[in-house]
Image: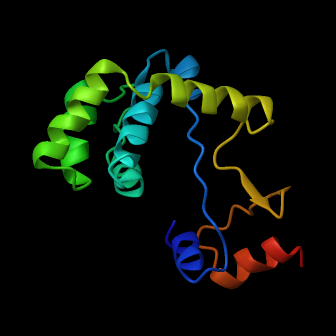
Amino acid sequence: GPVFESLAKKGETRLEYRTRYFLDINLKNDSSVRAARAAAIADTFGKYQEYHDTVFSNQPAKEGTGYTDDQLRNAFPQAAGITGDDLAKFQSSYDKGEMNAFVDAVDRQAQADGYNGTPTFLANDRKIDMPRKTNPTEDDIMKLVRGV
């Protein structure tokens, strides 16, 4: 969230997203994989974070409902700032499945690396357990990163 973004902007940490979509198995739909693939397309326009945040802020009220193609290819990219010719290119890429193989490979590698929950946090190549504190401060995060 905002604390991690602030630390990254200050150069204290680096954020790296590796999108997973394993929820589809339990929810019996393909909403997560379609959202992951759309987010990867948004990244080609420099709008990954904005698209990611839009998807999360528009989660369906009823778990398992999923996202519609209209949301993923029209409403969400526009809310993330992808408009005009870029929106048309985004939609074409979504329709053609141009990022499918990439996203599938990232998911397989994350699973092979043992990252089976989201979010997963690493500090200096070691997995750290983030406390379930509702609003960690920058100091809380940096203590974990430093291993204090």
Q: How is the image coloured?
A: rainbow
Q: Residue 129 sits in which quadrant?
A: bottom right
Left or right: where does residue 71 sit relative to residue 2?
Answer: left
Residue found at x 24% / y 45%: 77
How many numbered callouts? Answer: 0
Please identify the quadrant where the C terminus is shown: bottom right
Left or right: where does residue 123 sit relative to residue 148?
Answer: left
Residue situated in front as seen by the camera: 58 or 13: 13
Left or right: where does residue 120 sit relative to residue 90?
Answer: right
Residue 20 in view (yes/no): yes
Left or right: where does residue 131 sit relative to residue 82?
Answer: right
Give the image location of residue 115, x and y in percent. 74, 39
Outermost residue on the right side: it is 148
Instruction: Reply above or below: 70 against 17.
Output: above
Residue situated in front as seen by the camera: 116 or 64: 116
Give the image location of residue 43, x and y in percent. 40, 48
Residue 68 in view (yes/no): no
Residue found at x 53% / y 30%: 103
Residue found at x 64% / y 44%: 118
Residue found at x 43% / y 39%: 40
Outermost residue on the top side: it is 28
Give the image location of residue 144, x and y in percent. 80, 72
